[in-house]
Image: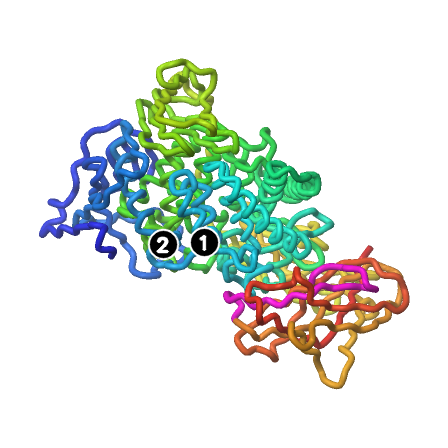
């Protein structure tokens, strides 16, 4: 417990003496699980109350022991309060913007979040990820800076971002299979860096950040972009604990090959930002715009689910790709905020995507028999992005629910926790959970800045578009807000989404906009029209679990799989397309000229589907050619010191479309972390064909062999020469260890 933060636990002899009587206050949000008022939160026997703008009391006590809530779908249990816990502001926050509103609860949570933000700054001025995470994490700090920290701590934001740069490139956090390019969401750094420029107008920062972003993005373009779809490969953004969001059969190379919604939203916005930066610096923008347009087109063509009204989670498979129909909370919100989704689809996403009473889950439906962390979990920072998207689209019900979900958790817990269990609303039961988690802190502050005051920053100035749900109506003030060379006091009166009038220093102005060239002290008053916003529905659901993923096997022409207890039917897919829906656990397949992939999903009575099973390949033996590596040993060692290039000639039996991959080993680290993924550029007849990715397969596991990602290409009959070259774009996050063993080249003829 940090000494500068005061949480006092007052133990009482009788539980009946310990409840905090909440004064009658206007209800802001009411659900079957909890109620949020202007002064506090009531949830069963639990209560939290704002005594003042600098003090909170809570009787919340978790009902669960450590890791004792695996896959329960029960409602929040009836807990017994036995103590009152108190948070009191103990730091001088006068240098930060001061917020006051009719919601005493919101005022106190704002102060709590500012105090926790200060506690999350290390000695060198950079932000850490949270109390349990003392390091600087690219994705954590970047999402936090984007949500709110750039607006109030631009200097610390710059320091933090530069701590995640090495050799002029953005560092990808450690992750699955040895980090980049299996984990590939580092470019959220670019979005945060642009936000810092929009807040500050600092041209020196712009030029510095542009070079870093461009170098990193160029490597990503070569290594991650799939030319067929226009989408970028890589793991789900921030969901980097692979078994929490992927089927068990997917190994790191499969995750690299997948195309995730949130990660592609990040890449799309990065290339749009490159175009904006380039224009601001007087350079051409066309190539950046073209790449961005390709990503957006791919997302709306390949990931959109018309029947559901929101995007799917990711494309996954091997030679054939299918769409996981799960919702992904962060990706859905980012697709709205970055305008990946056209305006006609944005409100549809918020109305149809599944949310629990406690907030938006990271994914829905949940994966059975996986403990809560990303699975069966609500992360407040993801909720904050949903809230921001709700304000942007003027979705009143979604906005009110989002604010209530964020305030409920931080008020009852007296801190901005990392996550909570989606099924119960409890912070206990998750695999790991930190206090004062930075992006949860930033998300709480974003309720004020992004939603209630509607702040959006651009190079030319600050736009204000407040969105105040009717229940939150009244007068709210943000004083001492430092914007470039000015100090602003901003007052928002009333409720609604339409501005009735706006004045600056007592004089009426035409729009709620503050020029970036402004200086001095100014007072801005925005009056909303108090009209109700047209209602739109919400899809409130319980945390439900999909059926287990079938395990399929192939014997001759018979595809069989295990029976799943909750399944009412099974769907068979061929090359990513549904071929049959049956109740049996077997299906007869027909061999063709080339390789075809078959998968099975289980479907329950509510039409909730499992993940697809691991692909089983139906292929005549003549359609596969294997070439042992040439040389005196059973394998070839690739490293960046003595053997940077491997080359070999092979013969193609007939014209066609082929998948080429390599049998490899990489024992440089575990599957789930570190940064020693090996990469090489594949060239066929001296022409670049793609990137071969060889993720880590285990610590010292040099006898553990598996296949790389396949590269799909057309080849003519006859001899061809392949080369695996180490090029600058193949530098991994380690920079020194980029090593793998190659034993075999495999060439598989695909069905035309």
Q: Which element is circle 2 on?
A: loop
Gap in angstroms between the C-alphas marked 2 and 1: 17 Å
The residue positioned 45% from the left and 25% from the top of the image is 514
Figure quadrant of residue 639? bottom right
Estimate the x, y position of residue 353 in percent, counting from the top left: 51, 39
Q: Does residue 682 show up magenta in the picture?
A: yes
Residue at screen point 43% across, 18% down: 499
Q: Residues within 10 Å of mark 1 (few under 14, many from 20)?
A: many
Depth check: 688 or 471 in front?
688
The one of 43 and 636 positioned closer to us in this rendering: 636
Residue 242's disc is: none
Location of the N terminus (image quadrant): bottom left
Asked which secondary structure carries label 1, the reply is: loop
> Which residue bears the numbered disc 1?
374
Dividing the image into 4 quarters, which one contains the C terminus? Answer: bottom right
Which residues fall within the magenta stretch?
670-691
Q: Nearer the viewer, residue 550 or 173?
A: 173
Residue 344 x, y percent position in the rendering: 59, 29
Quarter location, residue 708: bottom right
Residue 340: where, in percent of width, then height?
Answer: 60, 37
Residue 593 visible? The answer is yes
Magenta run includes residue 274: no
Q: Residue at x 54, y 47 (%)?
A: 209
- Categorize mark 2 by other alpha carbons within 10 Å: few (<14), some (14-19), many (20+): many
Q: Residue furthest top?
A: 508
Circle 2 residue: 130
Q: Is residue 320 above or below residue 506?
A: below
Answer left or right for 121 relative to 87. Answer: right
Task: Residue at 52% x, 30% y: name it.
Answer: 460
């Amino acid at each position: 417990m940090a000494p500068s933060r005061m949480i006092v636990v007052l133990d009482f002899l009788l539980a009946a003496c310990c409840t905090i009587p909440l004064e009658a206050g206007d209800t802001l949000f009411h659900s079957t699980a909890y109620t949020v008022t202007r002064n506090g939160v009531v949830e069963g026997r639990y209560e939290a109350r704002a005594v003042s703008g600098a003090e909170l009391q809570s009787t919340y006590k978790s009902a669960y022991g450590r890791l004792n809530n695996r896959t329960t779908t029960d409602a929040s249990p009836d807990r017994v309060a036995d103590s009152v816990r108190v948070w009191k502001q103990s730091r001088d926050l006068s240098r930060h913007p001061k917020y006051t509103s009719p919601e005493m609860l919101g005022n106190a949570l704002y102060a709590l979040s500012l105090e926790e933000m200060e506690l999350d700054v290390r000695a060198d001025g950079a932000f850490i990820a949270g109390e349990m995470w003392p390091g600087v994490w690219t994705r954590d700090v970047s999402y936090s800076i984007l949500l709110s920290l750039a607006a109030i701590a631009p200097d610390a934001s710059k320091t933090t971002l530069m701590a995640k740069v090495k050799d002029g490139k953005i560092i990808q956090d450690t992750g699955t299979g040895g980090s980049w390019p299996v984990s590939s969401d580092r470019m959220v750094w670019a979005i945060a860096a642009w936000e810092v420029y929009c807040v500050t107008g600092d041209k020196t920062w712009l030029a510095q950040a542009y070079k870093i972003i461009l170098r990193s993005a160029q490597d990503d373009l070569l290594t991650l972009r799939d030319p067929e779809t226009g989408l970028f490969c890589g793991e789900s953004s921030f969901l980097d604990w692979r078994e929490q969001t992927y089927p068990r059969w997917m190994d790191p190379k499969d995750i690299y090959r997948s195309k995730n919604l949130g990660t592609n939203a990040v890449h799309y916005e990065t290339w749009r930002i490159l175009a904006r930066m380039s224009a601001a610096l007087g350079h051409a923008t066309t190539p950046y715009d073209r790449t961005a347009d390709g990503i957006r087109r791919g997302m709306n063509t390949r990931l959109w689910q018309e029947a559901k009204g929101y995007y799917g989670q990711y494309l996954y498979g091997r030679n054939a790709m299918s769409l996981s129909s799960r919702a992904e909370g962060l990706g859905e919100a980012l697709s709205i905020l970055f305008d990946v989704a056209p305006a006609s689809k944005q409100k549809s996403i918020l109305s149809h995507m599944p949310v629990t009473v406690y907030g938006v889950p990271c994914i829905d439906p949940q994966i059975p028999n996986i403990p809560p962390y990303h699975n069966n979990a609500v992360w407040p920072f993801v909720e904050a992005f949903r809230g921001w998207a709700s304000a942007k689209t003027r979705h009143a019900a979604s906005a009110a629910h989002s604010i209530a979900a964020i305030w409920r958790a931080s008020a009852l817990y007296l801190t901005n926790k990392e996550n909570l269990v989606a099924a119960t609303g409890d912070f206990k039961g998750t695999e790991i959970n930190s206090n004062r988690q930075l992006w949860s802190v930033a998300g709480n502050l974003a309720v004020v800045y992004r939603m209630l005051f509607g702040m959006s920053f651009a190079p030319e100035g600050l736009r204000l578009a407040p969105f105040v749900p009717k229940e939150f109506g009244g007068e709210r003030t943000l004083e001492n807000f430092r914007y470039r060379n000015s100090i602003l006091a901003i007052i928002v009166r009333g409720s609604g989404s339409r501005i009735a009038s706006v004045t600056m220093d007592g004089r009426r102005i035409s729009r709620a906009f503050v020029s970036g060239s402004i200086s001095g002290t100014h007072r801005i008053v925005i009056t909303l029209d108090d009209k109700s916003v047209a209602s739109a529905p919400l899809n409130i659901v319980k945390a439900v679990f999909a059926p287990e993923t079938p395990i399929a096997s192939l014997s001759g022409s018979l595809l069989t799989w295990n029976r799943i207890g909750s399944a009412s039917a099974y769907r068979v897919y061929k090359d990513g397309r549904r071929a049959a829906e049956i109740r049996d656990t077997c299906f007869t397949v027909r061999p063709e000229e080339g390789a075809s992939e078959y998968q099975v999903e289980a479907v329950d009575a509510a039409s909730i589907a499992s993940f697809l099973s691991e692909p089983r390949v139906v292929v005549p033996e003549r359609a596969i050619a294997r070439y042992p590596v040439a040389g005196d040993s059973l394998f070839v060692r690739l490293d960046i010191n003595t053997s940077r290039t491997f080359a070999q000639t092979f013969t193609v039996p007939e014209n066609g479309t082929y998948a080429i991959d390599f049998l490899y080993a990489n024992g440089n680290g575990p599957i789930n972390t570190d940064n020693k993924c090996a990469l090489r550029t594949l060239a066929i007849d001296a022409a670049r064909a793609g990137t071969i990715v060889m993720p880590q397969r285990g610590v010292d596991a040099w006898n553990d062999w598996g296949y790389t990602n396949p590269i799909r290409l057309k080849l003519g009959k006859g001899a061809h020469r392949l080369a695996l070259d180490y090029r600058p774009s193949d530098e991994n996050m380690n920079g020194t260890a980029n090593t793998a063993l190659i034993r075999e080249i495999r060439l598989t003829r695909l069905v035309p």
